[in-house]
Image (spheres, rainbow, N blue to C red):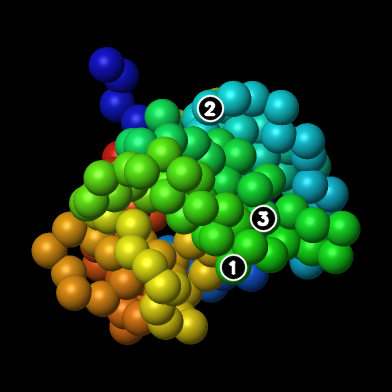
Amino acid sequence: MPEPRKFSGDKLVIASHNAGKLREIAALIAPFGVSAVSAASLGLAEPDETEDTFAGNARIKAHFAAKNSGLPALSDDSGITVNALDGAPGVYTADWAETPNGRDFPMAMTKVWDLLNNKIAPEPRKAQFRATLCLAWPDGHDELFQGVVHGRLVWPMRGVLGFGFDPIFQPDGASETFGEMDQEKKHEISHRADAFSKLVAGCFA
């Protein structure tokens, strides 16, 4: 395996229009003297995510942003996989929340729980948050890093912190959901933090 390419520079485009992800990633890269610039602030569109894997969609977003900004770009493709639903919603996590008026995650969480009830899925209802980070350069090179946090789904929804499916995901070894958890604590154990620690070791250390 060749050594990952090292990141040099002080500016990184975050190839996401998701405000929650932007806050999380900006906080994670700040200690390295790197400032985060959002794709939205550069007027970049959101490319169509046409792959059926987290890695494939992460690559689409990172390469689009790097090519159109002339700067290295970091993308994240993430979602929740539920064992009793054969890994769904997976890469379609955000799609399950889509409505004509924007994303409705309480609706999506209710849909997941109803499906589990319909299947009479046994407790604990195991699930994982998964994240793939892709760091791409304007010359077409990229590095991929994957992270995961294991846990279980709980009901009713708990907590107003975090975003997405956080209010029904309780990580292993914790008594709080990601929706209840202090965000600094979440950043220490999240799927994104797991992937990011690998990114740091590979490209920033």
- Up-down relation of residue 3 to residue 73 (above or below): above
Q: Looking at this view, name the residue that lies furthest to the top.
A: 1
x 85%, y 65%: residue: 101
Relative depth, front residue between 129 and 119: 119
Q: Secondary structure at mark 3?
A: helix
First along the sequence among labels 1 and 3: 3
Q: Position of residue 54 (x, y in %)?
A: 51, 34
First along the sequence among labels 3 and 2: 2
CA distance for labels 1 and 3: 8 Å
Q: Position of residue 5 (x, y in %)?
A: 40, 33
Q: Secondary structure at mark 1?
A: helix
**Label at residue 175:** none
At label 3, counting other C-alpha atoms closer than 10 Å, the crowd grade (few under 14, some 14-19, many 20 or more) is some
Relative depth, front residue between 157 and 195: 157
CA distance for labels 3 and 2: 18 Å
User: Left or right: 101 with respect to 36?
Assistant: right
First along the sequence among labels 2 and 1: 2
| Residue kind at label 2, given as amino acid type | Thr
